[in-house]
Amino acid sequence: MSDSVLRDLDEARRGPCTEQPDDPLMRDLIGELLRRTRNDQGRTLREVAEDAQVSLPYLSEIERGRKEASSELLAAIYRSLGLSLTDVFAELYRLSAPVQIMRPGSYQVAPMPQTPAPTQQARVLTLAA
């Protein structure tokens, strides 16, 4: 038998693919948020690193999702960028909310809102409290 036939048989035995998208890592979401905010403000990596008293290479690693920073270090970076913890939670919710799990093995991608509605922000704050 050819390799493709064997692969097809293996796939048939396993059943239909019920693979769900991987949940994003928190460090990737936070890094994306930090980099986007910094770029929107027109600031350099060096400016934010100096203001937050973080080494430039370490801040770069955080922005790229390669390092997980402590909450104290993240708080310093948030302050440097003028972000509150509420802003961060709201944005992380907005980035992660589009995928809704319908039942095990299936999911639906919901339209991504530009900004969270006030009720969504209130729920995020309730979870954070």
Image: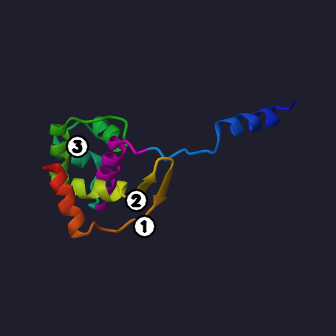
Identify the residue position indicated by label 2 in the image.
98
Mark nearest the camera among 2 and 3 is 2
Q: Are marks 2 and 3 in contact (CB under 8 Å)?
A: no
Q: Are marks 3 and 1 in contact (CB under 8 Å)?
A: no
**What quarter of the picture does the N terminus occupy?**
top right
Q: Secondary structure at mark 2?
A: loop
Looking at the magenta stretch, what is its main secondary structure?
Answer: helix
Q: Are marks 1 and 2 in contact (CB under 8 Å)?
A: yes
Q: Nearer the viewer, residue 57 or 14?
A: 14
**Between tags 3 and 1, which lies in front?**
1
The three-letter amino acid code for the residue at tag 1 is Pro
Q: Quadrant of residue 87?
A: bottom left
Per the model, the C-alpha gap separating discs 2 and 3 is 31 Å
Q: Which residues are magenta?
A: 23-40
Residue at 29 percent across and 47 percent down: it is 45
Expressed as whole percent of the image width and height from the top left, the position of residue 97 reads: 36, 57
Q: Position of residue 96 (x, y in %)?
A: 36, 54
Task: Give the residue at mark 3.
Answer: 49
Asked whether residue 72 appears in the rendered view, the answer is yes
Residue placed at 71% from the left, 39% from the top?
Answer: 12
Question: Camera-side residue: 75 or 120?
Answer: 120
Q: Residues within 10 Å of mark 1 (few under 14, many from 20)?
A: few
Q: Amino acid at mark 3?
A: Ala
Q: CA distance from mark 1 to mark 2?
A: 6 Å
Q: Earlier in the sequence, mark 2 or mark 3?
A: 3
In the image, residue 106 above or below residue 13: below
Q: What amino acid type should be assigned to the residue bearing mark 2?
A: Pro
- Occupied quadrant, residue 55: top left
- Colour treatment of the image: rainbow
